Image (cartoon, rainbow, N blue to C red):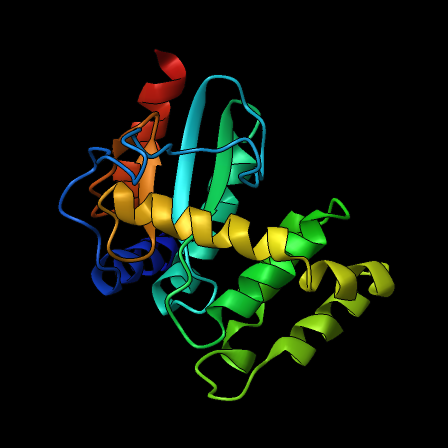
Amino acid sequence: MVVAVIVALTAAVVLSRPGDSASPTSSGDGAPAPLVRQDSPRLTSGKDAVFVEFLDFECEACGAAHPVLEDLREQYGDRVSFVVRHMPLHNNSMNAALAAEAAAEQGEFEAMHDKLFQTQAEWSHQEASQMETFVGYAKELGLDMRQFRADLEDPALTERIEQSKQDALDLGVTGTPTFFLDGEKLELTTVADLEAALDAAVDD
């Protein structure tokens, strides 16, 4: 189990294309880009530290990292806020992010987030839109489908995702997954590195 987790995180690190700098750069209005916004989805609400992942639901490295991060959420979620930021980079990434945000409107972001990664091999890297597949996931999760479909068309959700991607670019993020802990970009090689960083953050 430990070996499998290490392999998954190593794959995520190798396949990702992190930016060279974690320092916020000036956004268009001259203000520094925020790492977390008020409407950024939170998977947990711990008070001791803030862990941010810039992700793309279609990214294979993000998919490889997902089970590792699930375990870490279980282990540290009562002390660490795990926050998701969107950085869609592939054909169906935007629609996947929209599905997750539409689910969030019904309090089910985490359920859709996990579903998208668990089924990634079934829908990713397809040229045709996979939106109806995502609608099917919403049905499986028991969401109000009239509201879900309406929220998918809400320009505010698209703007939220586009803002997240712009924040990523302004922060120097160039690929996914990219991780920040308490405002500092993490450079990782193993799960042990990540666990050590989290331990240090919650013990401060």
Q: Is residue 117 above or below residue 187?
A: below
Q: Quadrant of residue 167?
A: top left
- Residue at far front of view: 29
Say left or right for 122 vs 11. Answer: right
**Residue sitting at the far top:** 204
Q: Is residue 191 above or below residue 95?
A: above
The answer to whether 6 appears left or right of 82 in the picture is: left
Image quarter for residue 140? bottom right
Residue at the spot 55% in from the left edge and 31% down from the top edge: 38
In depth, the one of 136 and 24 nearer the eye is: 24
Relative image position of residue 48 (x, y in whole percent): 46, 17
Q: Relative to the observer, which residue lies in front, 151 or 126?
A: 151
Residue at (32, 57) in percent of width and height: 176
Tell me: 123 left or right of 154: left
Residue 34 horizontal side relative to residue 127, left or right: left
Q: Is residue 88 above or below residue 33?
A: below
Q: Does residue 143 appear in this view?
A: no
Which quadrant, please, contains the C terminus? Answer: top left
